[in-house]
Amino acid sequence: MALIASVVVVLVALLHLYFLVLEMFLWDQPAGLKAFGNTPEKAALTKVLAANQGLYNGFLAAGLLWGLWLGAEGFGVKVFFLLCVLVAGLYGAATASRKILFVQALPAAIGLVLVFLSRPA
């Protein structure tokens, strides 16, 4: 179970690294425009805001990877960062797009369950 939990935590971290790349570097490029449904004009106006948002996604990924690196001692770190991802996903789903519920919040929730189930006694 610990291996499955770790794989899911890695996948959530990789997902947030992907968000970092989309928001910081590809926001006004075809891939970023398509991913977020933006026009070039809207992307130009919001590019700095998106880069800031991408940086925060990078911090979430770094925290999850840090928790994995700590091994068994990283339980609390993984839980904290998965909760941060879950709350961000729930907020995004409520305020921006329901799709965020499935892309961000659901993987974090699955990761949380698996991390708790794999916690050593």
Image (cartoon, rainbow, N blue to C red):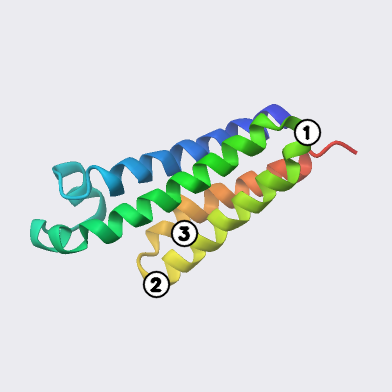
Instruction: Give the camera-side residue of 67 and 34.
Output: 67
> Which residue is label 3 attached to?
101
Can see residue 1? no
Farthest top residue in view: 3
The type of residue carrying mark 3 is Leu
Mark 1 and 2 residues: CB-CB less than 8 Å, in contact? no
- Near mark 2 (Cα within 10 A), the count class, few <14, some 14-19 or many ≥20, is few
Percent position (x, y) of residue 25? 25, 42
Give the position of the C terminus as an image quadrant.
top right
The type of residue carrying mark 1 is Ala
- Left or right: 63 in relation to 75: left
> Which residue is label 2 attached to?
95
Percent position (x, y) of residue 94? 44, 71
> Which residue is label 1 attached to?
72
- For mark 1, give the secondary structure: helix
Q: Residue at x 43, y 65 (%)?
A: 93
From the image, state whether disc 3 or disc 2 is nearer to you. Answer: 2
- For mark 2, give the secondary structure: helix
- Near mark 3 (Cα within 10 A), the count class, few <14, some 14-19 or many ≥20, is some
Q: In which quarter of the image is residue 75?
A: top right
Farthest right residue in view: 121
- Near mark 1 (Cα within 10 A), the count class, few <14, some 14-19 or many ≥20, is few
Percent position (x, y) of residue 119? 80, 39
The answer for how far apart the CA atoms under marks 3 and 1 are is 29 Å
From the image, state whether disc 3 or disc 1 is nearer to you. Answer: 1
Label 1 or label 2, whichever comes before in sequence order: 1
